[in-house]
Image (tube, helix red, strand yellow):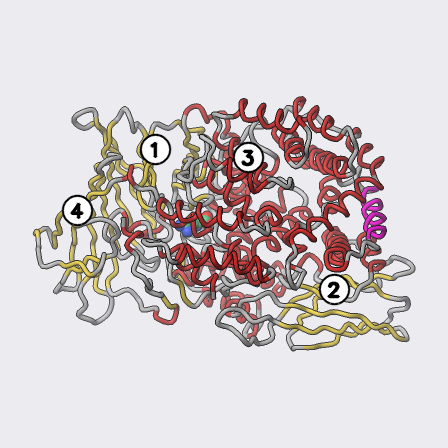
């Protein structure tokens, strides 16, 4: 297997080395003789020399050998292999080049290229998987139209799908049949897909704004059909939303989605044939939580939106990945915000950014939104490319305002349709249509690290002066940073009247330090800043607990109320973790009590607002993370909130309920009730486990069942084992639900979690071969700060062992799970040494993939 033979020091690809392709390939014909054991692939490429040069044709390949090569219909033997590349000398300006290879899908455990998942043959080509299928210039700036013919056993593979529209089908010898598909839109090879399997479709139609009818199909195994309605509905809503909000219409006559169980990521936007991890398709109330339902709609929307932001306009090279991913995340966030509560949606987005992107930006794997180099591009499908990238688009939309932003998007789609573009192309469209100068803004693409902004307000004689200062911390390879342009939405509120003293103002902080003056401020102002999280920065302000409590009650923007509460909680928790000072508890209890008054009106928001920051986010505030102290501080505040407000929690728990429905209000009530259950348990109330167990048994939906199980899983009662056993026995045949069973235990706050996780790794249902299962245990454990960072180092050893084993099967997924070990700089010397030892062990492993090598070696630097 190619990945296993990676050289000791794998090659680095650099952005500055970009050169246009030497040969273009306007047309491709692929002929697949499909069989899980041995699939024969014949590729016919029409190639055209690009510019004046005498270079031979160089085709990427990985893991296969050419069976034969033909040029203009004649077999040739003057080709050679340079590494894994096939080099074919060509004399003219245009030729037809044919290759034939054999591949073994059922042996493909990396899940890149053509592979088998539960009897289904499917593909994953982004970023560089197409070269594992056939020889091709496997780079995103080579755009071709594809004609694909598949032949396969009709009984095992009755359904044959590929990109574009179906053209023809028929019977073949020996119980085989064939189908032919044609995709008229030129696309890069990473968007190629085919699927062969025994599948059924949940079908529907969508009529586009110009009146064309599109046939929709969600393809799954027959038994899963009843769980596809939510995804199908989300697809139709997404298609209508993209027409209404971005003016983007779908362009083929069919749109198919296939769900497979073994998938490295969430889903893939292959033209006209999206392939999904089944966890982002399958849902019914009994097996999927509200969170799962939301995530399914968001991912279905995301992949659908890629049809324009990614497929019609693609990326010139992989350094531009955020051009499609950042923009598409921004688009799916806009979609999700429109489906329910925008404030709650923004809270979830910011929470995700703080959980994944801020730590990445502050650690050894920090990289700019447009990176300068990589060893393995799969390692750059990161929170920075996706989520910080989305924040960059959001900032530009704020600077331009909605009308100009829409005009700029229109210009971008129109100007670059059918081409492979760059981040720079996008920014220039924003500048032209927006009439703004984004020179300094471009630093957001080039500089890594989360900017810090200090903010304080002085008030004297009717004038408030806001003093701002910014600092961008050093990151690997970028010791010194230039000041960024930071769009900050600010507003002042009167401390006495609790009324707004100003309108919301957009401040563009450009210099290292600036002051902003507000006149006519007649009472003491309280500062509300970075409203709506207008910039992905860390605000350092000297606002008192009283002012934060005030804002959590009186700010007129719910997101800002949430932020004030989080800051108040964070300040309190840090004071406890660092110096054992719990004097802040009272202010938090008062602020939470006050927020609970809104529970009737807006349960979804209140449920979010009263949650404490995560242990790892608290840890991120400390100069040295003390996982035990953080845990104790957080548990202490949870107990105080639970105990002091016990009556309130019980009132909410026994209060308003609705029959199960996936509506914003019913969702909000479920969420709040489960949060209340958690606080009742935190209060130490003797009946908490019984309450949870009763809920667990009575639940008619997975949200309530999981809410109860999560509380029980961190508890000590016998009911814990009972609930886990009942859950296991009920769902042992449903892989997606069994993932939840593993995950809940890996996230438990019990003292013995590390030992339990090690035991679960030996459970007969645990396997590293399925990425979802690996993530549900190994991935979840890695983010359980206290359990993973036990002082003995057993957590570190466990992770390293799992990663080394997983790397042999699936390097991409292994590399994704490494970052918790790279946090060693944030911990005490003892833990740091133990973590480094494991990283060194990984790097020294013979036959390590370049994926894991890159992550581990960079984490040691
Ligand atoms: N483009 C896909 C998405 O964002 C993700 C594909 C990631 N695949 C990979 N091998 N890195 O929807
Ligand atoms: Zn994407």
Residue that badge 1 annotates? 120
In the rendered structure, the answer to whether residue 594 lies left or right of residue 250 reads right
Which quadrant of the structure image shows residue 285?
top right
Q: In front here: 268 or 520?
A: 268
Residue 658 at least partly seen: yes
The mark lying in front, picked from 1 and 2, is: 1
Q: Is mark 2 within 8 Å of ligand 2?
A: no
Q: Secondary structure at mark 4?
A: strand
Q: Find disc 3 in the rendering and name its residue.
A: 740
Which sits earlier in the primary sequence, circle 2 or circle 4?
Answer: 4
Number of numbered markers: 4
Q: CA distance from mark 3 to mark 2?
A: 41 Å
Q: Position of residue 578 (x, y in %)?
A: 73, 59
Range of residues picked out in magenta: 585-597
Which of the marked residues, 1 or 4, is nearer the chain's N terminus?
4
Where does the image place residue 3, in percent across and percent down from the top left?
31, 52
Q: CA distance from mark 1 to mark 4?
A: 23 Å
Left or right side of 463 for 725: left
**Mark before the other along the chain sequence, 1 or 2:** 1
Q: Which residue is mark 2?
A: 490
In the rendered image, residue 593 lying in the magenta stretch gets the answer: yes
Residue 492 at x, y percent in the picture: 81, 64
- State which mark lies toward you, 1 or 3: 3
Which of the two discs, 4 and 3, labels the residue nearer the N terminus?
A: 4
Instruction: Pick whichever of labels 3 and 2 is earlier in the sequence.
Output: 2
Q: Disc 4 vs disc 3: Cβ atoms closer than 8 Å? A: no
Q: Are marks 2 and 4 in contact (CB under 8 Å)?
A: no
Residue placed under numbered mark 4 in the picture: 100
Marks 2 and 4 sit apart, C-alpha to C-alpha, by 62 Å
Label 3 element class: helix
């Amino acid at each position: 297997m190619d990945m296993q033979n990676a050289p000791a020091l794998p090659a680095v690809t650099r952005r500055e080395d970009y050169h246009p392709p030497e040969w273009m390939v306007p047309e491709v014909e692929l002929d697949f003789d499909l069989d899980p054991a041995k699939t024969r692939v014949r590729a016919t490429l029409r190639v055209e020399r690009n510019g004046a040069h005498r270079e031979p044709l160089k085709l990427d390949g990985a893991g296969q050998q050419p069976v034969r090569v033909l040029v203009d219909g004649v077999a040739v033997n003057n080709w050679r292999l340079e590494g894994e590349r096939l080099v074919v000398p060509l004399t003219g300006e245009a030729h037809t080049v044919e290759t034939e290879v054999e591949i073994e899908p059922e042996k493909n455990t990396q899940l890149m290229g053509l592979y088998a998942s539960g009897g289904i043959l499917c593909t994953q080509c982004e970023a560089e998987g197409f070269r594992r299928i056939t020889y091709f210039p496997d780079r995103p700036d080579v755009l071709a139209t594809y004609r694909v013919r598949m032949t396969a056993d009709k009984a095992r593979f009755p359904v044959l799908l590929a990109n574009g529209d179906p053209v023809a089908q028929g019977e073949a010898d020996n119980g085989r049949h064939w189908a032919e598909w044609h995709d008229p839109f030129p696309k890069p090879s990473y968007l190629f897909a085919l699927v062969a399997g025994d599948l059924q479709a949940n079908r529907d139609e969508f009529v586009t704004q110009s009146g064309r009818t599109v046939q929709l199909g969600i393809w799954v195994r027959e038994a899963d059909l009843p769980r596809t309605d939510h995804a199908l509905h989300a697809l139709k809503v997404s298609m209508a939303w993209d027409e209404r909000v971005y003016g983007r219409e779908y362009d083929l006559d069919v749109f198919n989605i296939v769900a497979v169980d073994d998938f490295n990521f969430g889903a893939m936007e292959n033209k006209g044939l999206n392939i999904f991890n089944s966890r982002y398709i399958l849902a019914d109330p009994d097996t999927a939580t509200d969170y799962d339902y939301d995530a399914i709609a968001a991912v279905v929307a995301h992949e659908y939106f890629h049809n324009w932001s990614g497929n019609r306009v693609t990326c010139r090279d992989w350094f531009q990945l955020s051009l499609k991913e950042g923009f598409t995340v921004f688009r799916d966030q806009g979609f999700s915000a429109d489906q329910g509560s925008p404030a709650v949606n923004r809270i979830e987005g910011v929470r995700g950014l703080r959980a994944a992107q801020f730590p990445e930006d502050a650690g050894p794997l920090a990289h700019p939104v447009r990176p300068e180099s990589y060893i393995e591009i799969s390692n750059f499908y990161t929170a920075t490319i996706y989520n910080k990238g989305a924040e960059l688009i959001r900032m530009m939309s704020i600077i331009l305002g909605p009308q100009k932003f829409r005009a700029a998007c229109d210009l971008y789609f129109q100007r670059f349709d059918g081409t492979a573009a760059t981040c720079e192309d996008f920014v220039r469209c924003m500048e032209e249509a927006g009439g703004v100068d984004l020179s300094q803004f471009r630093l957001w693409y080039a500089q890594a690290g989360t900017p810090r902004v200090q903010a304080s307000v002085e008030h004297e004689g009717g004038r408030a002066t806001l003093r701002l200062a910014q600092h961008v911390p050093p990151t690997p390879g970028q010791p010194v940073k230039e000041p960024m342009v930071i769009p900050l939405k600010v507003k002042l509120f009167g401390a006495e009247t609790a009324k707004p003293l100003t309108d919301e103002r957009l401040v563009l902080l450009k210099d290292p330090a600036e002051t902003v003056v507000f006149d006519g401020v007649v009472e003491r102002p309280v500062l509300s800043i970075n409203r709506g999280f207008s910039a992905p920065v860390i605000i350092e302000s000297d606002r008192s607990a009283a002012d934060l409590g005030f804002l959590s009650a009186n700010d007129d923007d719910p997101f800002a109320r949430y932020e004030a509460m989080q800051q108040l909680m964070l300040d309190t928790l840090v004071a406890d973790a660092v110096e054992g000072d719990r004097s802040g508890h009272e202010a938090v209890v008062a602020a939470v009590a006050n927020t609970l008054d809104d529970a009737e009106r807006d349960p979804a928001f209140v449920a979010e607002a009263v949650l404490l920051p995560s242990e790892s986010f608290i840890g991120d505030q400390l100069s040295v993370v003390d996982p035990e102290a953080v845990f104790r501080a957080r548990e202490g505040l949870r107990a105080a909130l639970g105990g002091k407000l016990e009556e309130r929690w019980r009132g909410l728990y026994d209060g308003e309920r609705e029959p199960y429905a996936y509506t914003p209000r019913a969702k909000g009530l479920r969420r709040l009730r489960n949060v209340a259950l958690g606080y009742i348990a935190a209060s130490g109330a003797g009946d908490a486990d019984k309450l949870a167990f009763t809920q667990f048994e009575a639940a008619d939906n997975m949200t309530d069942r999981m809410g109860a199980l999560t509380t029980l899983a961190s508890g000590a009662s016998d009911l814990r084992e009972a609930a886990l056993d009942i859950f296991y026995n009920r769902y042992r045949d449903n892989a997606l639900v069994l993932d939840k069973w593993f995950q809940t235990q890996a996230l438990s706050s019990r003292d013995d979690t590390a030992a339990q996780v090690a035991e679960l790794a030996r459970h007969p249902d645990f396997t590293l071969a399925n990425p979802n299962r690996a993530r549900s245990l190994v991935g979840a454990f890695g983010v359980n700060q206290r359990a993973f960072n036990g002082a003995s180092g057993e957590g570190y050893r466990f992770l390293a062992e799992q990663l080394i084993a997983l790397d042999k099967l699936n390097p991409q997924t292994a590399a994704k799970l490494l970052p918790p070990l790279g946090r060693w700089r944030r911990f005490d010397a003892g833990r740091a040494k133990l973590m480094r030892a494991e990283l060194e062990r990984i790097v020294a492993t013979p036959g390590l993939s370049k994926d894991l090598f890159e992550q581990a070696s960079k984490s040691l630097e």
